[in-house]
Image: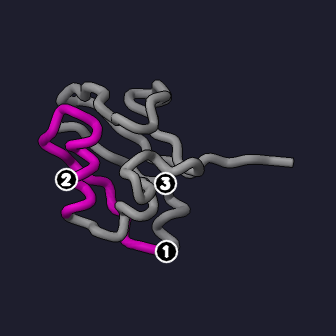
């Protein structure tokens, strides 16, 4: 089953444990995680259901560029990292 790993920084504010999804499409897997841990949705997605500007998702080490559809295929052994984008200066 695909595994979703949320950024450790998020755990300072809400419960964000690793989650094993049964879905093999990114959006569906995220929806399963949100159903189990409702506060995660507001951190990851905006009001339109798009990936928030300050969040980056990697699937098996590759960045997700489409921030709206989130229809990327997952393999049963996929690891999805949901991270907070960092900016410096």
Of the residues under marks 2 and 1, which one precedes in the sequence? 1
Magenta stretch containing residue 18, yes or no? yes
Q: Provide the residue span drawn in magenta.
A: 14-35
> Where is residue 37 drawn, in percent x and y?
27, 67
Q: Which residue is mark 3?
A: 7
Colour setup of the view: one colour
Mark number displayed over residue 32 = 2
Side of 65 relative to 86 (left or right): left
Q: Residue at x 36, y 51 (%)?
A: 49
| Image quadrant assignment for residue 35 | bottom left
Side of 62 relative to 72 (left or right): right
Q: CA distance from mark 2 to mark 3?
A: 17 Å
Q: Residue at x 36, y 38 (%)?
A: 80
> Where is residue 4 drawn, in percent x and y?
32, 46
Of all residues, the one furthest to the bottom in this rendering is: 13
Q: Which residue is mark 1?
A: 13
Of all residues, the one furthest to the front in this rendering is: 48
Q: Residue at x 12, y 42 (%)?
A: 22
Please rate how many residues cluster around mark 1, counting C-alpha atoms within 10 Å: few if below 14, some from 14 to 19, many from 20. few
Q: CA distance from mark 3 to mark 1?
A: 11 Å
Residue 10 drawn above or below residue 20: below
Residue 33 drawn above or below residue 51: below
| Image quadrant assignment for residue 29 | top left
Of the residues under marks 2 and 3, which one precedes in the sequence? 3
């Amino acid at each position: 089953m695909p595994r979703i790993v949320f950024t450790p920084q998020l755990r300072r504010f809400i419960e964000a444990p690793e989650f094993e999804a049964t879905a093999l499409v990114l959006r569906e897997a995220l929806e399963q995680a949100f159903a189990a841990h409702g506060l995660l949705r507001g951190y990851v997605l905006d009001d339109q259901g798009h990936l928030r500007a300050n969040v980056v998702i990697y699937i098996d080490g590759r960045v997700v560029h489409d921030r709206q559809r989130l229809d990327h295929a997952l393999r049963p052994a996929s690891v999805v990292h949901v991270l907070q984008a960092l900016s410096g200066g």
